Amino acid sequence: MFTYENGAAVCRTPLLATVTALVLAGVLAQPATPRAEAAPAAFVHPGVTVSKGQLDFVRAKVDAGAQPWKGAFDRMLASKYADLSRTPKPRAIVECGSYSNPDNGCTDEREDAIAAYTQALAWYVTRDERYARKAVQLMDAWSAVIRDHTNSNAPLQTGWAGSSWPRAAEIIKHTYSGGWAGSGRFAAMLREVYLPEVVNGSHSNGNWELSMMEAAVGIAVHLEDKASYDKAMARFRTRTAAFVYLASDGELPRTVPSQNLDTRDKIVRYWQGQSTFVTGLTQETCRDLTHTGYGISAISHVAETSRIQGQDLYGTDIGERLRQALGFQAKYELGAAVPSWLCGGSLHLGLGPVTEVGYNAMGHRLGMPMTNTRALTERNRPAGSNNLFVAWETLTHAGNPG
């Protein structure tokens, strides 16, 4: 049995408390299939990042002209992604090199996927069927054409676009009664083109695989694929633990076994040369806060999808890693002086619009202390899109009880 004290879960069963403490400290391995990883008996729809209850909350707030939702909605409608004259640009082969160079369909794919999600949100809030039909047009155009992703950034590109597509599809398939004849072909696209590229991971950098697992989890929900859901969630938990450091991990951060980071020197190099480890530091903090934000955002999206599906990770070490990572990065994004022991005394800022989901879940809904995250979140409202896989999260998650 668990209770909450100062925002932290405390176990009241002595034996279970001891085992839990040892697991969090890394002394005992986590179970191969913990309950929080298991797919639900029946999937909830719409259920990727946003639920019907959350969408109803948003619609009511926008209709009432309440802030910050009305301002966030107006910003979304004014964006290029909500343009009803948008023409999809599908390709059979999307080729993406490092930093999308070459960019043969990379930007087009990501932005059409975000546009489909944007149009789906606009449909739900306004009930204007033109937006639903535009979302369908975008999804149908890509599902009729795309066959593969190639070049070095293929796994990451698939993860980014594959995170947005199921969000759009969930809203349209499960709330729009006007019909979507191509929904089966779209599901086949997710199953055959996207899922095989992401579900097994890439053994690459932290934000890559976290984004890939976000896509895999969302796709699994839309396809009601329990085996893929379980596989992606297990990899997600391992990767999250290796991305965000907690003091309870011990002297060194956790690692992904397949990466062979078996010495302190290897770990320090992998953590961008950072040799002092403190709670909330991430594997990419010393690279830049932009890539760090990609990983944090993916963690929050998977945790939110998992909560909607009935397994709440916010009260576990996953939630604590997310809370601490948000707070640590937000402190410096807000202007705190960077100490000499951290990244040589210099940080590359630019966290991005990635704080709303985690802050709403833990700071607002659960009442956990998140002072820095709250300040940064409120300063940045209304949050827009990073043009990769994050979009409109002030609208969908600000103050949302879920």
Image: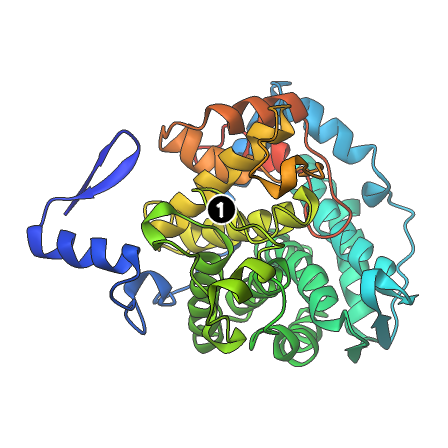
Give the answer, above or below, for where 63 lies relative to 328: above
Query: From the image, which quarter does the C terminus lie in?
Result: top left
Give the answer, above or below, for where 183 lies relative to 292: below
The image shows residue 36 at horizontal and vertical percentages of 33, 60
Q: Is residue 221 left or right of residue 171?
A: left
The image shows residue 191 at horizontal and vertical percentages of 62, 77
Instruction: Give the residue at x 80% y 46%.
Output: 130
Q: Is residue 134 left or right of residue 173?
A: right
Q: Give the camera-side residue of 246 and 117.
A: 246
Q: Which residue is mark 1?
A: 276
Instruction: Give the residue at x 75% y 46%.
Output: 119
Q: Is residue 44 visible?
A: no
Count of picture labels:
1
Instruction: Give the residue at x 78% y 79%.
Output: 148
The image shows residue 106 at horizontal and vertical percentages of 84, 63
Q: Give the camera-side residue of 324 and 227.
A: 324
Identify the secondary structure beneath mark 1: loop
